[in-house]
Image (spheres, coloured by chain):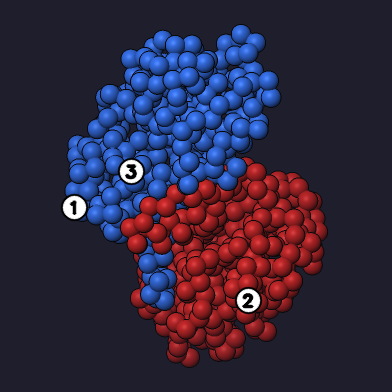
Chain colours: A red, B blue
Amino acid sequence: MLVITESDPELPPPPLELIPADVEVVAVGATPTDEQLAAAQVVYIWDHRFADLGSLLRRAPKVRWVHAASVGVNRLLCPEIHDVVLTNSRGVFDIPIAEWVMAAVLSHTKGFTESWALQREHRWRHRMTGRLAGTRAAVVGTGSIGRAIAERLMRLDVDVTLVGRAAATDPQFGTVRASADLVLVAAEVDLLVLAAPLTTATTALVGAEVLTALGPNGFLVNVGRGPTVVETDLVDALHAGTIAGAALDVFEVEPLPEESCLWSMPNVFVSPHMSGDYIGFEGDMMAMFTSNLTRWLRGEPLHNIVDPTVGYVPS
Amino acid sequence: MLVITESDPELPPPPLELIPADVEVVAVGATPTDEQLAAAQVVYIWDHRFADLGSLLRRAPKVRWVHAASVGVNRLLCPEIHDVVLTNSRGVFDIPIAEWVMAAVLSHTKGFTESWALQREHRWRHRMTGRLAGTRAAVVGTGSIGRAIAERLMRLDVDVTLVGRAAATDPQFGTVRASADLVLVAAEVDLLVLAAPLTTATTALVGAEVLTALGPNGFLVNVGRGPTVVETDLVDALHAGTIAGAALDVFEVEPLPEESCLWSMPNVFVSPHMSGDYIGFEGDMMAMFTSNLTRWLRGEPLHNIVDPTVGYVPS
C-alpha cells in the first residue's frame, strides 16, 4: 500500500507503526514514482491538502481502495474514483467538532468576545448577556458530525432542527428539513450551524437571502466547508448588522488571506480550520484505517464507504 | 415595604410595577429616613452592593422579613439578621451561570483565547486542542448553582465530583466530598469550579496547596466569591505554570483594580461579575420575590430561607 503524506509542519505524521507488520507500507510525498504506483493496491491519503488523485489513479492500475484521513473528500472526487472504493474517516472528529461548536455558541451567547476586548484594556464593564437554553438552532448536515452537534445542543436545552439534502423523518431528531427550504428554516432559528460536505447542493447554499432570514439576532457557525457560504454576502451582512455575528473555522480560501476583512470584524471569530483536530487524533484516525484494513485483508465489507456521486457516506 | 435600591447604572431598576397594587411600596436609596424605616415590615434589597443592613434593621423595629435580590448574602450577615427572616434569590441565576461556566471551560479546552489573540494579528496558525468529554471536574458548592453546573458538565460527558461543607451522599451526584479534602480532590481532577457562598469555611479555601494539587494541566473557574481564592497564590501559580489557566468572574476586590496583573495574563479570562446576569433577569427575579410576597401575605412559609449561621439556603 501507499501512504500519501506531505510533511505538513502543522500536523503530526501518520503513526505508520500502527499498521500490521505484514502489510508492505511505502510512505511517499505527493509525487510517487511510476514503480511505486504500479505496485500499490491500497492508497491512504494522509495529507489533507492532496488534490491530485485523478492523475495518481491513472498511473496505479492495481489500486482498488483509497482511504482518506479526513471526512470531507471534495478534493479527491474525480472521474477515476468511480473505479475504486473510497472510504473516509467519518466519526473521528464528531465530538471534538461538536465541542468546538458549543464553545463558539456559548462564547457568543455569554459575550466573551467583548469581555476579551475589554480585558485587553483593563476595563471592568458589566453587561447583560443571553441564554442558550430555550433558543432554536438549525444544523445543516445530517452526517455524524451534524448529528453530534445537534445532540449536544439538545443536551443544553436548545431546540434543534436538522437540515439535509431532502426532507425526511429521523428516528432521533424528528423532522429533517430540506436544504432547499433553508431560507424558511433560517427565519425560524437563532443559530445556524453548517456541518455539511461540499457538494454541488451545498456550494453557495448560504447567501444574502438566508442571512437576511437568519436576522439581526442570528448567529452563524461554519465547521463544514468554506464555499458553502458566499463570503462576500457574509461580510456585507456582518457589516450591516443583518446578522449578529459568526464563528468560522472554514473559508472560501484557506489559509484566510491576511487582507480579508473577516479577521478584524468585532462580531466574527476566525479559527484556522482546526475545530476537529485534537491532541492525539492521529492515533484514533490510524486505528480507524487499520480496522478497515483488517476487513479488506479478510475480504469483508469496508466501513465508511463514500458515495462518489454525492461526496459523502450516506446515512 | 421598603425597596433598597441605589441607581446602579450597570443594572436595570427593579420592575416595581410587578408588585401587587395593594402593597405599599417605598423605593429608597441606601439612606432611608427614620419615618420610612419605622413603618416598614418587609425590606427588599435590590442593590447588590448594599452592605449596611445591621444599622438599617436597628432603626426598623417592625421589619420581620428581608429579601435579597442576589444569591450570595455575605454582605448582609449581621447580628440583627437573627431577629428577622432572610430569603435570597436562589435559582434565578442557576442555568445562566452554568452556561457561563460551560463557555469558559470549552473556550479553554478548544484554545479560543489563543485563537482570539492570533486573530487580532491576522495570523493563521493551526493547533491541536483538547477534548472536554472524558475529563474530570470538581464543583465546589452543593447549592442550586453548583448543581446546575455539575449537571451540565455531566451532560457533556465530564466526570463530576461535588464538593460540599461535609462529606455526604447525594441522590443525583453520588459521593459528595468534604471541602476539607479539597487538596486530595484537586489532585484527581482536570477542572476545579468554585460556586460556593462566602463563609468562614470557604474563605481562602483555594490557596497554593490546592493549586499545586490541581497541577499544570488544571484549570480553575470561579463564579462564587473572590475571597474563596487566595489571589496572590493564584497569580503566583499562573505565572509559574503550576496550573494551566483560570476563568474568573469574581475577585477579592471588585471592580478588579486596573493595576491587577490578572488583567494581562494570557492564561486568565477576566469577567466583570456578570456570569449570571442575563437580559431580562430582573423580571424573573421580581417574580421570585412576589411569589414569596404572596406567601407572606397569606401567612404561609417562605421559600429560600437563608440560615444566617452559614449564610446560604440549606439544601
Q: CA distance from mark 2 to mark 1?
A: 45 Å
Residue type at tag 3: Glu
**Vertical side of B127 occupied by A35: above or below:** below
Earlier-in-chain disc, 3 versus 1: 1
Labelled pair 3, 1 in contact (Cβ < 8 Å): no
Q: Is residue A216 above or below residue B213?
A: below
- Asked if residue B227 is positioned above or below residue B133 in the image, the reply reads above
Q: What subunit carries mark 1?
A: B
Residue underneath mark 3:
B254
**Residue A258 badge:** none
Is disc 3 in the same subunit as disc 2? no
Q: What residue is disc 2 on?
A: A236
Residue A175 horizontal/vertical position (percent): 78, 51
Circle 2 SS class: helix
The chain letter for the residue carrying disc 3 is B
CA separation, marks 3 and 2?
40 Å
**What residue do we see at 60% from left, 86% from top?**
A54
Q: Secondary structure at mark 3?
A: loop
Q: Give the letter of the chain under mark 2.
A: A
Q: Position of residue A261 (x, y in %)?
A: 51, 78
The residue drawn where x is 31% and y is 48% is B256
Q: CA distance from mark 3 to mark 1?
A: 25 Å
Q: Which class describes the residues within 10 Å of circle 3: few (<14), some (14-19), or many (20+)?
A: few
Check disc 1 and report the residue beneath it: B240
Residue B291 relative to residue A21: left or right: right
Q: Secondary structure at mark 1?
A: helix
Camera-near label (2 vs 1) is 2
Amino acid type of the residue that numbered disc 1 sits on in the rendered structure: Ala
Amino acid type at circle 2 is: Asp
Residue appearing at x 52%, y 16% in the figure = B39
